[in-house]
Image (cartoon, rainbow, N blue to C red):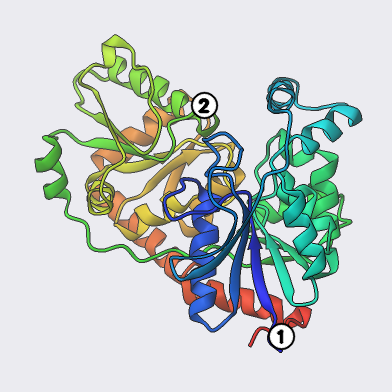
Amino acid sequence: MPETLAFVMPWFGPDIPGGAEAECRATARALAARGVPVEILTTCARDHASEWTDQLPEGLSMEDGLRVRRFKVRPRDANRYYNLHRRLHLAGTLTSFEEEDFVRESINSNDLNAYLEAERGRYWYAFIPYCFGTTWEGVLVAPDRSLLIPCLHDEPFAYLRWTRRALRAVRTVCLHVPAEQALAARITDGQSSVFAQVGEGVDLPPAGDPERFRRKYQLEEPFLLYAGRKAPEKNAPLLVEYFARYRFTHKDRPLKLVLIGSGRMRMPERLRGEVLDLGFVPPQDKVDAYAAAVALCQPSLLESFSIVMMEAWLCGTPTLVHARCAVTRDHCLASNGGLFFDDYFEFAEAVDLLRDNPDLRRRLADNGRAYVLAHFTWDRVTANYLRVLERLGAHLA
């Protein structure tokens, strides 16, 4: 009898923002298209941004062609969790007792864990991402039947004892790139289950039209593009700060900053008219924005892959990233598709170089596109997953 691959995550839905959430949806669909029986096991919580309570009906449903089973959220002390979250963010660590409380008060479901145990004979479990109770506790229910897709970042969550335990417990840890694997090896002191670099699949976008984007949003000047959540953990405030300094010191060199994605940022008065915050835009507008930009600037330090870099390269645009993010820096080095900066002066020099050299921009973008097509097509990534599952002895067809 064929077994089923179940993706286990805190929440699931077609419109939920977030890199791990999007990766789960896309990977499940890609494997299902290759004939793998796939299900989603999740809670009744709506998404990360909402209250982690039952907001969606429990039970089985079909969503976007996938079987989805939802389970009631375990009662939790939200205030205790948020206080410990703040302490972890500020101090970088928790005591052993605090960590136990933190994991216990994260999102989880007793009913989900009971289902994982009762049905372990007919499922293989793929937990994604690492930093929630559904994974920290869930991987211990049936570790011999479990994979972990951690989406691992170099952040305080990653160094918790529960994270180390999860990485060591499962049969295989599926990782995106060498820098993420190096972080996992460092966290586990080399005492982990098998690591497998599977990558992440990237959809090929439609052709972008830079002039259409400029006309629609009345943009004549060259511009840098930021795509993603406008949040401190994504280092978006640093980009705005650096851009403001650049405009102050380069008044004779017109340049704007365009922001797309969720969240809002308070802008200094001196940047009025210099920064265009478009929020969410239609998919074609996003592609057109990539095609029109001088470069995509990805300043985040907390990335395990960075899908926006891949999208920019596929749309013919180079990238500019922070040197202290090993994942995005290594993408640039491996592809020769972008530049990186470690301080404002390097940022300004890179912007000038990209702004003034269209031939350089084109070469970098071409290199980046070739890199994506060589490593991160869905055919390649699904083949990587199928090899992992075959090696584990899963009977999924």
Q: Quadrant of the C terminus?
A: bottom right
Task: Name the quadrant of the N terminus.
Answer: bottom right
Q: Earlier in the sequence, mark 2 or mark 1?
A: 2
Up-down relation of residue 173 to residue 348 (above or below):
below
Q: Position of residue 318 (x, y in %)?
A: 35, 49
354 in relation to 123, above or below: above
Which disc, if any, is residue 395?
A: 1
Mark 1 Cα-neighbour bin, 10 Å: few <14, some 14–19, many ≥20: some
Q: Residue at x 27, y 16 (%)?
A: 271
Q: As shown in the figure, which amino acid type bears the numbered disc 1?
A: His
Asked if the residue under mark 1 is in contact with the one under mark 2, i.e. CB atoms within 8 Å, the reply is no
Q: Nearer the viewer, mark 2 or mark 1?
A: 1
Helix, strand or loop at mark 2: helix
Left or right placement of residue 391 versus residue 33 in this view: right
The tally of labels here is 2
**Does dot 1 land on a helix, a strand or a loop?**
loop
Task: Tell me the number on the disc at residue 34.
Answer: none
Q: Which residue is mark 2?
A: 232
Q: CA distance from mark 2 to mark 1?
A: 44 Å
At a point 59% along the width and 73% down the height, the residue shown is 38
Q: Nearer the viewer, residue 340 or 282?
A: 282
Amino acid of disc 2? Pro
Q: Position of residue 23 (x, y in %)?
A: 52, 58
Whole-percent x, y for residue 26 in the image:
48, 64
> Which of these two is toward me, 361 or 178?
178
